[in-house]
């Protein structure tokens, strides 16, 4: 799949909707900047984008990333302001990765419980109890 340049879909969309091309360009720019921010800030481990696909965090890579950040924290020199700022940035990244790993583990547990309940015949949809 080859990505298309914005001129291939902004101008035709503007003419189809009878809107200003500048407005359509700003909407598309806002949408993709929000998408980039969501992906880069690790807000969720599974981001689904219509007509493009699903972006998933690799759960196998997260422990390696956590180890990398912990090692980086252990060798940082925090005696300077630059070192303190770097330490704070690395700690924030580490917290995001740990939170993402927790989300993945919670989802796995929830799925396993659902499958276990399904096999036992308890689907949790009994309205009488």
Image (spheres, rainbow, N blue to C red):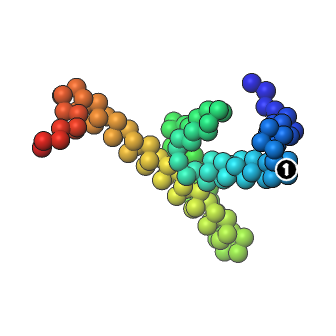
Say which of 67 and 104 sits in front.
104
Q: How many discs mark residues in the rendered view? A: 1
- The residue labelled by disc 1 is 20
Q: Is residue 40 visible?
A: no
Q: Is residue 78 above or below residue 107?
A: below
Quarter occupied by residue 52? top right
The x and y percentages for residue 82 are: 72, 70
Q: Looking at this view, name the residue that lies furthest to the left.
A: 129
Look at 81% across and 53% down and name the residue there.
Answer: 23
The x and y percentages for residue 96 are: 54, 55
Say which of 99 and 125 sits in front.
125
The x and y percentages for residue 128 are: 12, 41
Look at 62% across and 36% down and name the residue there.
Answer: 50
The x and y percentages for residue 98 are: 49, 52
Q: Is residue 71 above or below residue 86?
A: above
Quadrant occupied by the N terminus: top right
Say which of 32 and 91 sits in front.
32
Quadrant occupied by the C terminus: top left
């Amino acid at each position: 799949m080859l990505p298309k340049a914005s001129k291939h879909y902004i101008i035709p969309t503007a003419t189809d909707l009878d809107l200003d091309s500048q407005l359509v360009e700003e909407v598309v720019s806002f949408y993709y900047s929000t998408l980039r921010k969501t992906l880069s800030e690790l807000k969720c481990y599974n981001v689904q984008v219509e007509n493009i696909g699903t972006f998933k965090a690799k759960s196998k890579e997260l422990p390696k990333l956590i180890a990398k950040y912990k090692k980086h924290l252990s060798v940082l020199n925090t005696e300077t302001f630059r070192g303190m700022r770097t330490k704070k940035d690395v700690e924030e990244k580490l917290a995001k990765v740990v939170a993402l790993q927790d989300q993945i583990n919670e989802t796995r547990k929830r799925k396993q419980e659902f499958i276990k309940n399904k096999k036992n015949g308890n689907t949790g949809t009994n309205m009488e109890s």
